[in-house]
Image: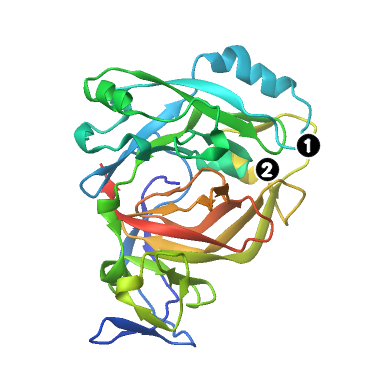
């Protein structure tokens, strides 16, 4: 989720944090209103052409991945001719050539664990019900599929050689005509993850802010994914839980092929209300990340998909985060933060 930089004044509702000498943070039950008038960069929209990130020392994000040549020969005609779906379409395999120039030049491939190299579906496609996955080697859901990256692939990329990988695409709603930009590969190294007192500092320094009330609209979580409410020990803080607002959306009903090539196309086809979609399309309260902070949503829990495969939140993001939850009753998503900046 990213776009062109603009600048604006931000007014943010935040809770008052009080940190004790022991590293425990007291979070007030009734939030106060803090007014922040500093000028900050704001990201909006979903368009990205060369949005490679440098995340900390070891993590990175690729340029957008274009659909393969097989797209025009097999996949696109299938989507155009398919009837309106009453259930999710079967997965379509998409062979993709992964080239070294997709990734930033500075990547040290010797430090890359192949099992951690993942794919994120372009956000406007995910909101239209298009889910694209690179199966993980440790994911039992994809047993029998051609799986993700292996050490031989990493060795080849480090030498400038292209490797062949297979993505899997499903259209969950209906016939969608979408652009050839599918999403991005990304690698998040645990050494670049922000947790504990460093994560609390991001809030205290206004590098991260969430509109609303602590405990109701957002809260910190521990290693086990349990919410940390009134008495927060900085040593336990591992991530951030974002609860959904009351806003729900759905893709308009249509017997025609629906074009989703951009954010504008998406907004033209989105209507308020839950509708009869296969995902819970909703929003969090407004979230602000500084230009050197990136986020990643948790898309799986206990081996089960809970969110479509579109987890990346770009550095500099400001605004509600649109969620594509796979469970109609789920009202939150967990987000983990990383040191990040545009490359």
Residue 190 vertical placement versus 290 (above, below):
above
Q: In which quarter of the image is the C terminus?
A: top left
Q: Nearer the viewer, residue 111 or 161?
A: 111
Q: Nearer the viewer, residue 150 or 83?
A: 150
Q: Which of 271 and 217 is in front in this view?
A: 217
Residue 112 vertical placement versus 34 (above, below):
above
Number of numbered labels in the structure image? 2
The image's mark for residue 269 is 2
Q: Is residue 198 left or right of residue 301?
A: left
Q: Position of residue 78 (x, y in %)?
A: 68, 19
Q: Is residue 38 left or right of residue 277?
A: left
Q: Position of residue 184 (x, y in %)?
A: 42, 35
Residue 7 vertical placement versus 26 (above, below):
above
**CA separation in Å, label 2 and label 1:** 10 Å
Q: In this view, does 49 lie to the left or right of 327?
A: left
Q: Is residue 342 left or right of residue 286?
A: left
Q: Say which residue appears at 62% left-offset and 32% top-offset.
A: 170
Disc 1 marks which residue?
254
Please rate how many residues cluster around mark 1, counting C-alpha atoms within 10 Å: few if below 14, some from 14 to 19, many from 20. few
Could one spot residue 336 in this view of the protein?
yes
Contact (CB < 8 A) between labels 2 and 1?
yes
Q: Say which residue appears at 48% left-offset and 72% top-offset.
A: 227
Quick one: label 2 or label 1, which is nearer the N terminus?
A: 1
**Is label 2 in a helix, a strand or a loop?**
helix
């Amino acid at each position: 989720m990213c776009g062109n930089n603009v600048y604006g004044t931000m007014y943010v509702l935040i809770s008052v944090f009080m940190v004790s000498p022991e590293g425990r943070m007291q979070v007030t039950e009734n939030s106060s209103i803090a007014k922040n008038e500093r000028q900050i960069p704001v990201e909006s929209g979903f368009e990205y052409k060369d949005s490679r990130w440098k995340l900390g020392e070891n993590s990175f994000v690729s340029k957008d991945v274009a659909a393969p040549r097989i797209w025009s020969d097999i996949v696109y005609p299938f989507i155009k001719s398919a009837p309106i779906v009453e259930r999710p379409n079967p997965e379509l395999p998409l062979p993709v050539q992964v080239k070294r120039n997709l990734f930033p030049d500075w990547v040290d491939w010797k430090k890359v664990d192949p099992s951690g190299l993942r794919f994120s579906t372009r956000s406007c496609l995910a909101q239209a019900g298009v889910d694209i996955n690179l199966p993980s080697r440790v994911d039992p859901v994809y047993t029998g599929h051609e799986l993700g990256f292996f050490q031989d692939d990493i060795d080849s990329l480090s030498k400038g050689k292209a490797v062949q990988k297979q993505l899997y695409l499903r259209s969950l709603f209906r016939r969608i005509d979408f652009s050839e930009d599918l999403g991005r590969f990304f690698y998040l190294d645990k050494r670049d993850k922000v947790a504990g007192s460093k994560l609390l500092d991001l809030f205290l320094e206004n590098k991260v802010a969430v509109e609303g009330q602590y405990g109701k609209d957002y809260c910190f979580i521990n290693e086990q994914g349990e919410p940390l409410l009134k008495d927060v020990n900085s040593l336990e803080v591992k991530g951030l839980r974002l609860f959904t607002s009351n806003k729900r959306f759905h893709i308009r009903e249509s017997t025609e092929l629906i074009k989703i090539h951009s954010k504008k196309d998406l907004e033209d086809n989105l209507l308020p209300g839950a509708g009869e979609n296969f995902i819970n399309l909703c929003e969090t309260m407004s979230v602000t990340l500084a230009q050197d902070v990136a986020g990643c949503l948790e898309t799986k829990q206990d081996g089960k998909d809970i969110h479509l495969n579109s987890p990346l939140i770009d550095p500099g993001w400001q605004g509600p985060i649109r969620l594509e939850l796979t469970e109609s009753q789920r009202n939150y998503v967990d987000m983990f933060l990383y040191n990040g900046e545009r490359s």
